Image: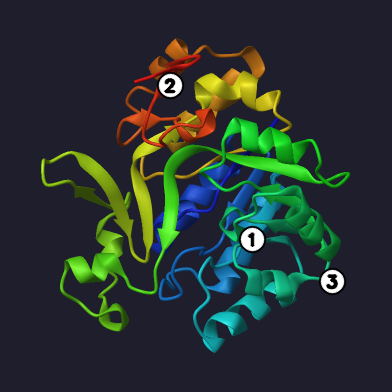
Amino acid sequence: MRLALGPVLYHWPRERMLGFYAEAAEAPVEIVYLGEAVCARRREMRLDDWLAAARILAAGGKEVVLSSQALLESEADLRALRRLAEAGAFCIEANDLSAVGVLAGRGPFVAGPHLNVYNARTLALLARLGAARWVAPVEISRAQLEAIAADRPPGLEIELFAHGRLPLAFSARCFTARHYNLQKDDCGFRCMDHPDGLPLQTADGDPFLVLNGIQTQSARVYALLGDLAAVACSGVDIVRISPQAHGTFEVLRAYRNALERGASRSSADLHLAGHAPDETCNGYWHGVAGLERVRTEGQAT
């Protein structure tokens, strides 16, 4: 299996983003996704900045994919998508069906995890439109993925979200702005104050969700490091690591080592110790509640 670095989902300053991708150029990863996938108001990085970073990564031997926005709400969003498509230099990840419409017939594209594909017939339709790779929805189980993989179109790659806070939902409302009693259109870009998102707790004080602008994430960090052997047997070609504020490249190295040498679930916990912003989980892969951590076959904790 190959290793992919997903797009940065948080709002980081431009210099931090450029430094991150400069480091990614030297990281043990074959594929790098970059681009603004969450909020159209985040304009620290312009299209020229993304393309410049992409060229540096490509020169370093990385396969580069430009990620499109997941929730398109206006004509301005569509214009930005068209400019991305017309740049023509790199493959694009479509995270909204509007993006599929724009990209169809322009060449191969990646069907992103937010297209909600749950059966092989839909996957076949996307392949006819030009999809060369499918990133499975984050909540898919091993059994569901194996059933789809068995009937996938010839040559279509499958990528699985394997590490990071799970992107669960998008909303037209910005919950980070709402937290600060601000309007979405006058948010002050407060999400930049939370480089790993804004934690949300239950009334009892337990970690529950993470607010990331218009995106809602899991509080626990999805981690399939100890499940990679099963993932490889399920028809997956690529596993994705989602960037976090600290420790992303240590996590990448842990997954690289596991891909090359193998890793038990107990050793996986040790490898990730100190490099995850919260407790880890892997429930969705095992067909149980997503926040659970399955430590042995058939046993969830």
Amino acid, disc 2:
Val
Graded by Cα atoms within 10 Å as few (under 14), some (14 to 19) or many (20 or more), the crowding at tag 3 reads few
Between the residue at mark 1 and the residue at mark 3, the CA separation in whole angstroms equals 17 Å
Q: Residues within 10 Å of mark 1 (few under 14, many from 20)?
A: many
Residue farthest to the left, as pictured: 204
Per the image, the residue denoted by label 3 is 105
Among the two numbered marks 2 and 1 on one chain, the one whose residue lies closer to the N terminus: 1
Task: Indicate the position of residue 269 as horizontal and vertical percent values.
Answer: 40, 18
Give the residue drawn at x 49%, y 80%.
73
Residue at horizontal 30%, vertical 57%? Answer: 211
Q: Are marks 2 and 1 in contact (CB under 8 Å)?
A: no
For badge 3, the amino acid type reads: Gly
> Which mark is in front, 1 or 3?
3
Residue matched to label 1: 66
Question: Of all residues shown, which one is farthest toward the bottom?
Answer: 75
The disc, 1 or 3, on the residue closer to the chain's N-terminal end is: 1
Q: Residue at x 44, y 35 (%)?
A: 222
Secondary-structure class at tag 2: strand
Q: Amino acid at mark 1?
A: Leu
Residue at 22% in and 50% down: 200
| Residue 111 placement (x, y as % from top left) | 69, 57
| Element carrying mark 1 | strand
Q: Nearer the viewer, residue 76 or 30?
A: 76
Residue 87 shows up from this direction:
no
* Tag 2 residue: 294
